[in-house]
Image (cartoon, helix red, strand yellow):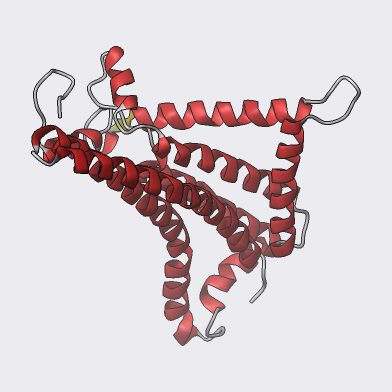
Amino acid sequence: MASQNGATETPTEYIVHHLTHLKVGQGFWTVHVDTLLMSSLLAAAVAAFLYVGVRGGSAAGAPSGLRNFVEMIYEFIDGQVSDIYHGNRALLVALALSLFTWIVAMNSMDLLPIDMPGSIAALFGAEYFRVLPTADLNGTVAMAVVVLCLIIIYAIRAKGVGGYLHEWIAAPFGNNPLLWIPNLALNIVELLAKPVSLSMRLFGNMYAGELLFMLIALLGMAFAVSIGGISLFIGQIIAGTAWAIFHILIVLLQAYIFMILPIVYISMAEEHH
């Protein structure tokens, strides 16, 4: 397959090229520009979509089809949150709506033709460009860290600073000085497991989906160099279409999971042990 400079890429070079970020800096201070750019643009696009949907309506005052769609999404998310969290849920509904719509938008970038984002980026002089923010562990961890902060804030709000700190050494085995260290160790593991599982689940699923699209695209490379290329080309079309249709379910499911688990974690954080 031809690269941007006209040379022929091997399958390994093709995959490595598509998995390389557009970045600045080195080491710990490396910044993935493509992840930041795409996530910011999609956040703005989702915000504009929701704003236009909420404000939309016909001349007679009846809601438009877009507004009905946005309200349907809102009512679905509000119902999910109300089933889990029984306090004042206004902020959590806003959080869940933001997470769900934003992650769906980011995940959906995986459905674009695999070579199109890089080709467009090349027009602006970028050698590398990954269009899928949720296939970058830096992006998913950043979202999970925000959720972790909210878990701690809601726990302190419900129990107070003293009550929250006391729970670290008194639960789940009881307030026995001999059990303070085991309690503390278990609570640290439990707290850190939440953002780790959130970020790794989303990253793992989207990274695997992106990689599978690349492997399917390599059938096109085989079509260009093999004798039995026609069958491989047809196989690429069938496999790519089938995986794209199935991947739509993954896009929605992973967004739903990342939306619902923070609400569960926050609800659990407010419970007294």
**Side of 116 relative to 53 (left or right):** left
Q: Residue at x 67, y 70 (%)?
A: 271
**Side of 158 relative to 25 (left or right):** right
Q: Residue at x 67, y 61 (%)?
A: 160
Q: Residue at x 57, y 44 (%)?
A: 99
Relative vertical location of residue 178 with respect to residue 224 in this rendering, above or below: below
Nearer to me, 172 or 77 = 77
Of all residues shown, which one is farthest toward the right?
60
Question: Where residue 166 sits in the image (x, y, percent)?
Answer: 58, 71
Q: How many marks?
A: 0
For the C terminus, the quadrant is bottom right
For the N terminus, the quadrant is top left
Of all residues shown, which one is farthest toward the top?
124
Q: Is residue 218 visible?
A: no
Q: Is residue 132 visible?
A: yes
Question: Where residue 239 sits in the image (x, y, percent)?
Answer: 32, 47
Relative vertical location of residue 55 with respect to residue 259 in this rendering, above or below: above
Question: Where residue 56 sits in the image (x, y, percent)?
Answer: 77, 25
**Side of 20 relative to 244 (left or right):** left
On the image, which quarter does residue 29 sit in? top left
Question: Where residue 227 sits in the image (x, y, percent)?
Answer: 8, 39
Q: Residue at x 12, y 42 (%)?
A: 228
